[in-house]
Amino acid sequence: MTTKTAALTVQKWGNSLAVRIPSAIARSAHFHLGTPVELAVHEGGIVVRATGERKLTLDERLALFDPQKHGGEVMASKPVGLEEF
């Protein structure tokens, strides 16, 4: 697993502090808009960790597809119903 890093600056956001997560790092962490996270102080730093189930990528979903379990072919091999002309 490759660790991505970025040098950022803490900025003021209202009465709080904020750091923007670069898109490349967000993608690597499987973060998207609305991802619930938790913050923890660890060894003098802050760890941001996603909570709950994360959304699977298309590749991960396809890897889980089992033709035996899901009935093999996903499309009919010949026209059916009103598709025939």
Image (spheres, grey):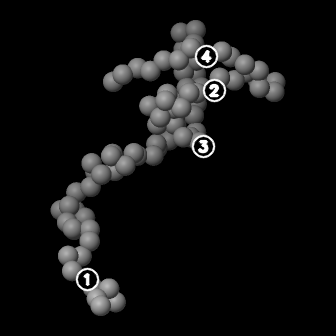
Extreme residue toward the right, this view: 15
Location of residue 50 with respect to 2 vertically, above or below = below
Res. 41 visible in picture: no
Q: Tell which circle, 4 or 1, labels the residue nearer the N-terminal end.
A: 4
Residue in the picture at 25% in, 64% down: 70
Residue in the picture at 27% in, 48% down: 63
- Kindly identify which residue carries mark 1: 79
Q: Which amino acid type is shown beneath numbered disc 1?
A: Pro
- Kindly identify which residue carries mark 3: 34
Quick one: label 3, few (<14), some, or many (20+) residues within 10 Å? few
Q: Mark 2 or 3, which is nearer the eye?
A: 2
| In contact (CB < 8 Å): disc 4 and disc 1 | no
Q: Tell which circle, 4 or 2, labels the residue nearer the N-terminal end.
A: 4
Rendering coords of residue 2 (x, y %): 36, 22
Q: Mark 1 or 3, which is nearer the eye?
A: 1
Q: Nearer the viewer, residue 7 or 39?
A: 7
Q: Which amino acid type is shown beneath numbered disc 3?
A: Gly
Q: Quadrant of the N terminus?
A: top left
Rendering coords of residue 33 (x, y %): 59, 42
Q: Which amino acid type is shown beneath numbered disc 2?
A: Arg
C-alpha distance separating marks 2 and 3: 14 Å
| In contact (CB < 8 Å): disc 4 and disc 2 | yes
- Kindly identify which residue carries mark 2: 20
Q: Which amino acid type is shown beneath numbered disc 4?
A: Leu
Location of residue 27 with respect to 10 vertically, above or below = below
Extreme residue toward the front, this view: 85
The reply, left or right, for residue 7 in relation to residue 83 is right
C-alpha distance separating marks 4 and 2: 8 Å
Q: Mark 3 or 4, which is nearer the eye?
A: 4
> Which disc, if any, is residue 8?
4
Quick one: label 1, few (<14), some, or many (20+) residues within 10 Å? few
